[in-house]
Amino acid sequence: MRIDTLNLSAELVLRRADATDLPDVLTLLADAARWLDGLGVRQWPSGGFPAARIEPLIDEGVLYVLTVADETAAVMALDDHADAEFWTPSDRPESAFYVHKLAVNRAHSGRGLGEVLLDWAGLRALAAGRRHVRLDCSKENLRLQGYYLGQRFRHVRTVDLPHRASGALFERPAGLRGGRTEARVRDLTAAGKVLLTH
């Protein structure tokens, strides 16, 4: 199966995470962190994130879950919080939305869920009048950097801070990436309308 295709018989549902999602989100992020650690990639804490790091994202309403048959299949935060150690005033940080904590349940990897969330982020950015979607990832994770390049992000620069594993900065224009994904997402963040079908 090509990485940009999604063949799921169950409906994909995208919604804001709430407090009841916290255990599943923490488990998904911890599993992703362990998987990365097993590949030798130091991106996230090897045991996952403490609840105190994720709860504020839920409280702010910027953490989203993508579910398949009531299973948390992917998670992503999307906000306008530019990391000041990475994005400088000359980058016009206010012109973008920023993706954080993007992770796909390993049971659903390779099915295009990351692409679905990134396209949704692009649509949200466009609707809000932002010019770009931006993200950062591990300086050493060439595989993930290649994935983002394949999703039509461009490498802006790499910021090498000794106290941060992350620092490879990417952006792409707001909107869709231009590819096709066989996906139909029921977007509950848009009053239950189907927002992303392409």
Image (cartoon, rainbow, N blue to C red):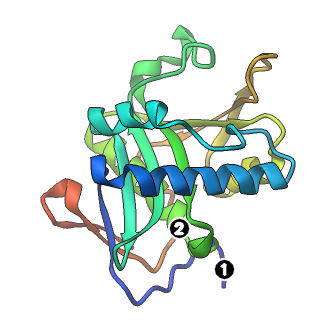
Residue at image x 53%, y 67%? 179
Whole-percent x, y for residue 137 in the image: 68, 38
Residue at image x 39%, y 63%? 66
Contact, mark 1 vs mark 2 (Cβ under 8 Å) = no
Badge 2 crowding class, 10 Å Cα cut-off, few under 14, some 14 to 19, many 20 or more, is: few
In terms of depth relative to the viewer, which is nearer, 83 or 195? Answer: 83
Q: Residue 8 appears in which quarter of the rendering? A: bottom left
Q: Residue 90 appears in which quarter of the rendering? A: top right
Residue at image x 43%, y 53%? 23
Farthest-out residue, left = 191
Farthest-out residue, right = 40
The residue that disc 1 covers is 2
In terms of depth relative to the viewer, which is nearer, 144 or 178? Answer: 144
The residue that disc 2 covers is 179
Whole-percent x, y for residue 171 in the image: 57, 37
Q: Viewed as shown, does residue 96 lie left or right of 35? A: left
Whole-percent x, y for residue 102 in the image: 53, 49
In terms of depth relative to the viewer, which is nearer, 162 or 50? Answer: 50
Reading the chain from its start, which is encountered first: label 1 or label 2? 1
Q: Amino acid at mark 1?
A: Arg
As displayed, is residue 137 above or below residue 146? Answer: above
Which of labels 1 and 2 is toward the front? Answer: 1
Distance CA(mark 1)–CA(mark 2)? 12 Å
Whole-percent x, y for residue 117 in the image: 45, 57
Q: Amino acid at mark 2?
A: Gly
Q: Is residue 87 visible?
A: yes
Q: Quadrant of the C terminus?
A: bottom left
As displayed, is residue 136 above or below residue 194? Answer: above
Badge 1 crowding class, 10 Å Cα cut-off, few under 14, some 14 to 19, many 20 or more, is: few
Badge 2 element: loop
